[in-house]
Amino acid sequence: NSHSPAENVRVTKEAEFALKQAFAYCPYSPEAVFHFMDLLLSANRIDDALLVLRTCHKLDPYNDQINGWIDRLEHGKADQVGQFLAQVQRAIDAKQNDTAAQGLDQLLHLPTIDPKSMMRVADMYLRIGDFAKSEEAIKRLTQMAPASSEPWYNLAVVQSHRGETAQAVASLKKALELNPAEIKQNPQMINLREHLYKDPSFAPLRQTPEFKAVFPAKP
């Protein structure tokens, strides 16, 4: 029998409640897990399905079925982000900036996006001239990789371009605090303190009193 949209929503909610109860009662039961996961995937709730699987994995870490599903869903999610980025790229190439911006906005607020993809989102915002959203994306990136100097340095570039002098100097200071540990771990890593004085992106910033107060002289 066909149901109205409201009836479908009610039935789905009831099914989800029943499956949650079964999962809570026996979270390591493959039958309970797979039924619940199937319902979530049918609604495209991939992250919720992964949460269920990871909870089961903690209780039964050697279950090959569970581990296999986790791998498949994680790879599928990465492919989904890649396809989304490709669509945005095509929109930018076609000069369809509004379409590109809509896609980027969805990626910006995607909870499970990886740092590399978030950096591409920030770069794409720059390409369509939205510096404010690019700054927002890089700020998210600094939260995703707080011990990495590169996001802080890139954040300073955008802030400097937007005339946010105090914020740019603060971001640079953070980047330079993190950089020595990275160089110690990887001697091929760029020395940001030296690069800072050659980088044309910071030419106007280097002339400001705020910059000179924090970075008084070349290294």
Image: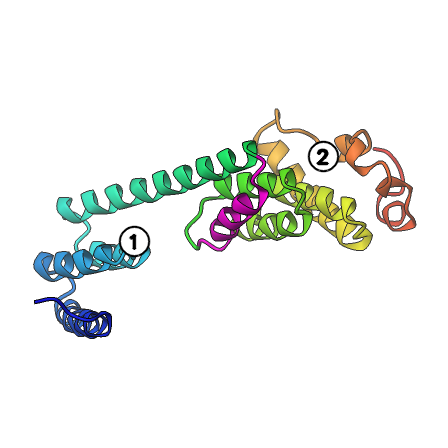
Residue 180 vertical position relative to residue 63 in the rendered view, above or below = above
Relative to 97, 107 lies left or right: left
From the image, tell me which residue sits under label 2.
192
Q: Vertically, is 167 above or below 81? A: below
Q: CA distance from mark 2 to mark 1?
A: 39 Å
Residue 148 showing in the rendered view: no
Residue 79 location, x and y as percent? 35, 38
For residue 46, the mark is 1
The reply to whether dot 2 and dot 1 touch (C-beta < 8 Å) is no
Stretch of the chain drawn in magenta: 95-110
Query: Horizontal placement of 25 versus 202: left or right?
Result: left
Q: Residue at x 60, y 36 (%)?
A: 182
Amino acid, disc 1: Ile
Query: Which element type, helix, strand or loop, lies under badge 1?
Result: helix
Q: Nearer the viewer, residue 16 or 105?
A: 105
Q: Residues within 10 Å of mark 2 (few under 14, many from 20)?
A: many
- Judged left or right of residue 154, residue 44 is left
